[in-house]
Amino acid sequence: MLIKRAAANDCLPSEITPPEIFARRREFMQFSAAALASGALGALLPSAEAAEKLAGKPSPLSTPESPTPYKHVTGYNNFYEFGTDKEDPAANAHLLQTQPWSVSVEGLVKKPKTFDIDQLVKLAPLEERIYRLRCVEGWSMVIPWVGYSLAALLKQVEPTGSAKYVEFISAVQPENMVGVQRRVLDWPYVEGLRLDEAMHPLTLLTLGLYGEVLPKQNGAPVRITVPWKYGFKSAKSIVKIRLVEKQPLISWEKANPREYGFYSNVNPTVDHPRWSQARERRLGEFTKRETLMFNGYNEVASLYAGMDLRKYF
Amino acid sequence: MHRFIPALKVLLFLLCLAPLARLGWGFQQDTLGANPIEALTRGLGTWGLNFLLITLAVTPLRKLSGWHWLTRLRRMLGLYAFFYVLLHLTSYLWLDQFFVWQDIAKDILKRPFITVGMAAFVLLVPLAATSNNYAIRRLGGKKWTQLHRTVYPIGIMAVLHYTWLVKLDVTKPLLYGLTLAALLGFRVLWRYREKQKQLGGAYLRKPKGRIIPIVAKR
Ligand code: HEM
């Protein structure tokens, strides 16, 4: 395994990948994709398709930390619609039907609209945002996402004054999703944010990662990414976005309200009832790191001024 | 059969090392996936539990099959259960907690799944320590048997440990739980049957008290 000493809590200059290496890695990926397309590796990976490119311009909101290798980002995650083990999504998500795809934005808005996926891609300039991702289970990654602030989409539909929350509803395709055939969670997967959280520039409407369209196991074709909250808050494969007045009941809270709250901000001082949240294992590192408040995104702290984050966990 | 027992033991000894070899090799070759440390801890825990259940299966198997030599493999299987649990604990103390004792103490006290896992481990220690002929002789068969019955609650605690650590999907711990229930249930049923047999056969045995022969003297 790759053994790397973790810095106590911040990133070392050595962790910043020099751009030329970053570019070379991309060349390698292009090469791999080309090799796949030409069928050189096709025999080995029958279900792999050449990934479609989706580039975004670098964003000042990116972390300089070096991204977690592509194979881990796409090979190890939670996506319960495809099974409850972290290797399941990579194994089972190829069945997800992503074409055609549209996202209906509705509820307390002046201009409800259904967006085709191609419209979404063109709605705002794409950016590459390299974000930390902290899972509630105590592991973390760094992922170069591609997308734009969700605010750009929400502004188009013009939320009314009574809209206080945004609800995200994920796709349910029972024939294509092995996990949905079992009632571990109450499908469809529902997530939610307060409107001001949803409008925060960090909240990303995500269409790609590592310079290509989202792999199916990572929530193709469109998901959100909320980097200061535990991973499950970032809903995948979204089909509906509703603006509502009351706080939505999110799937994990519904399944176990004692352990999962609506806010679920990354918070090292509030333990999960079954494990500590003080530290995390960055995939690829040997020792654990200290977990940072709001996953290191302190610019969101003002959203929660005066709130007891132990109560609103 | 008895002639083959020593050879069988050697074979079993090596076979029981296979899961460890696989995990070790995978760790070394980086084929345990994105989170090799978690995979290692979990793999060792899984095999600790597997060996616990395999050990508990020896007696039912022996009774059902009549293969009494199976008992002679039981000690090794039990010690392997302890061995894998010990490595599992070590992996937790070292690779998960890096020997930060305050954190470990907090974990054991605060997290129910760790608490019950630790309790199961503590109870396993005396069993492992007395798994030798010397201890059996010193304790005497009856005491030794009584002591080693703690393996039943240990099994239950280990399954609880697994059940409490999963987030939602309890399928796998449930399967282990059902297996354990079958192994323990067998013992209850067997004991009940033996009792019935004893009761049923009572009149065949010699009655207690003086027997007056009623034989006419010639
Ligand atoms: C009889 C004793 C024990 C048995 C049979 C046992 C068995 C197991 C099993 C089967 C798992 C789940 C593996 C999986 O998910 O595939 C597990 C996980 C775990 N066990 Fe144990 N265990 C025991 C004792 C302990 C002790 C004493 C500790 C620590 C004090 C411990 C810490 C853990 C931890 C931290 C995990 C979760 C690993 C993770 O999620 O990364 N266990 N154990």
Image: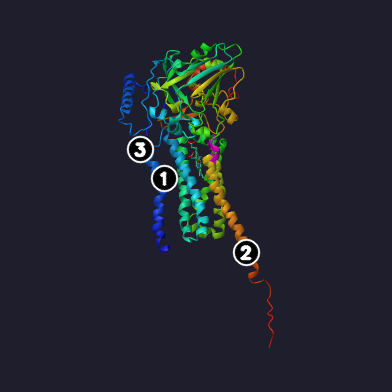
- Same subunit, tags 1 and 2: yes
- Same subunit, tags 2 and 3: yes
Would you name the residue on which mark 2 appears? B198
Residue B189 versus residue A11 in the image, above or below: below
Would you name the residue on which mark 3 appears? B29
- Identify which amino acid the numbered label 2 is placed on: Gln
Give x and y (percent) for residue B5. 42, 60
Secondary element type, mark 1: helix
Give x and y (percent) for residue A247. 60, 21
Structural crowding at the residue carrying mark 1, measured as other residues with C-alpha within 10 Å and reported as few (<14), some (14–19) or many (≥20): some
Give x and y (percent) for residue B201. 63, 66
User: In screen coordinates, is A116 left or right of A107?
Assistant: left
- Same subunit, tags 3 and 1: yes
Examine the image and state in which quarter residue A163 appears: top right
Give x and y (percent) for residue A238. 50, 22
Q: Kindly tell me whether residue A239 is visible in this rendering.
A: yes
Which badge, 1 or 2, is on the more N-terminal residue?
Answer: 1
The residue mark sitting in front, 1 or 2, is 2
User: In screen coordinates, is A280 left or right of A164?
Assistant: left
- Identify which amino acid the numbered label 1 is placed on: Pro
Please report contact status of discs 3 and 1: CB closer than 8 Å, yes or no.
no
Secondary element type, mark 3: helix
The residue mark sitting in front, 2 or 3, is 2
Separation (CA) of disc 2 from disc 3: 59 Å
Which badge, 2 or 3, is on the more N-terminal residue?
Answer: 3
On residue B19, the disc is: 1
Residue at 64% across / 72% down in the picture?
B206
Looking at the rendered image, the quarter that the N terminus of chain A falls into is top left
Q: Provide the residue span drawn in magenta.
A: B161-170
Whether disc 2's CB lies below 8 Å from ligand 1 is answered no
Looking at the rendered image, the quarter that the C terminus of chain A falls into is top right
Q: Chain of mark 3?
A: B
